[in-house]
Image (spheres, grey):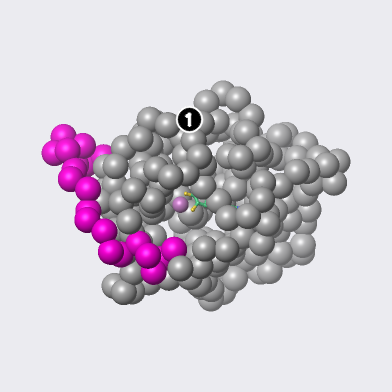
Amino acid sequence: MDLNKADRIKKMRVPQVDGKLEDRLPPGQVETKKFPILHEGDVPVYDMKKWSLSVEGLVGKRVEFSFEDIMKMPQTTVVRDIHCVTRWSRFDNAFEGVKFTDFLKHFDVDSKAKYVMVHADYDYTTNVPLQDLLRDDVILAHSFDGKPLTEKHGFPLRLIVPHLYFWKSAKWIRKFQFLEEDQPGFWEQNGFHMYGDPFKEERFSSDEFEMPEDEWKKKEYD
Ligand SMILES: Nc1nc2c(c(=O)[nH]1)N[C@H]1C(S)=C(S)[C@@H](COP(=O)(O)O)O[C@H]1N2
Ligand SMILES: [Mo]
């Protein structure tokens, strides 16, 4: 696994930004029309009869949802720009799924819960403040552009948190763990920022790191 990612990424020139795009394109980002595919490890293969999404931690009791349960919840489409820390941004992405706030109606959350650790396959975690997940455009997405997510983009279900760098938008989500204190997830333990606001360029946990501007171009797209 590429644990020195954050380490490598600080030593590069920053791309020039087109003036007209300034308010839409966060600093240091480049627009792409393609949809890069980025993750660590293998693409999971599921038996959907066994698949579940669970909630635990500071919730009334642990609850498990089947994919059918999720599909019965109110469905919402959001169209948002997404920004990956490896410097690509993609505009106007239509994701469909269940708003996190609608999902929350199906279980009780302790008022002490302030953070959520998102657990995804395989062994991926990322931390997000609960407050951020309550925004209107945060969804558990099963579709992109009117079609079910492809396996590589997170089938059957991924989180979409458009206002933070895209590493927070975990693919292949399996569990939300509600916590009182913030804890670092996978990339956050490996040099990336605990919060990750693209417009503030919160890429790294310290200034020792730098992002190469062309890292993502070496990856796969569709
Ligand atoms: N489970 C899992 N989710 C993940 C990742 C991962 O490695 N594992 N990578 C993250 C990163 S760094 C990015 S940029 C996006 C990429 O999503 P995409 O492949 O659909 O573009 O997924 C995020 N979600
Ligand atoms: Mo990323």
- Answer whether residue 8 is magenta in the image: yes
Instruction: Describe residue 16's horizontal placement relative to residue 89 as left or right.
Output: left
Instruction: Using the rendered image of the protein, determine whether residue 121 is visible from the camera's viewpoint.
Output: yes
Q: Residue at 78% across / 53% down in the picture?
A: 64
Label 1 residue near ligand 1, CB within 8 Å? no
Residue 167 image offset from top left, x and y in percent = 48, 54
Q: Nearer the viewer, residue 176 or 83?
A: 83
In this rendering, position of residue 6 left or right of residue 144: left
Res 176 → quadrant: bottom right
Residue 150 coordinates in the image, percent (x, y) = 62, 33
Q: Nearer the viewer, residue 24 or 8?
A: 8
What kind of element bears circle 1?
Answer: strand
Q: Residue at left 81%, top 40%?
A: 48
Q: How many residues crowd around disc 1 within 10 Å: few (fewer than 14), some, or many (20 or more)? A: some
Viewer-proximal residue among 67 and 122: 122
- The x, y position of residue 67, in whole percent, is 75, 40
Residue projecting furthest to the top: 146
Q: Between residues 104 and 70, which one lies in front from this camera angle?
A: 70
Range of residues picked out in magenta:
5-24
Q: Which residue is mark 1?
A: 94
Quadrant in the picture for residue 200: bottom left
Q: Is residue 55 magenta?
A: no
Image coordinates of residue 21 in percent, x first then y, are 21, 37
The quadrant of the picture occupied by the N terminus is bottom right
Three-letter amino acid code at the position of disc 1: Ala
In the rendered image, the residue lying farthest to the left is 19
Q: Is residue 74 left or right of residue 29?
A: right
Q: Quadrant of residue 202?
A: bottom left
Q: Residue at x 58, y 39 (%)?
A: 153
Q: Residue at x 35, y 62 (%)?
A: 9
Residue 77 visible in the picture: no
Q: Is residue 217 above or below residue 124?
A: above
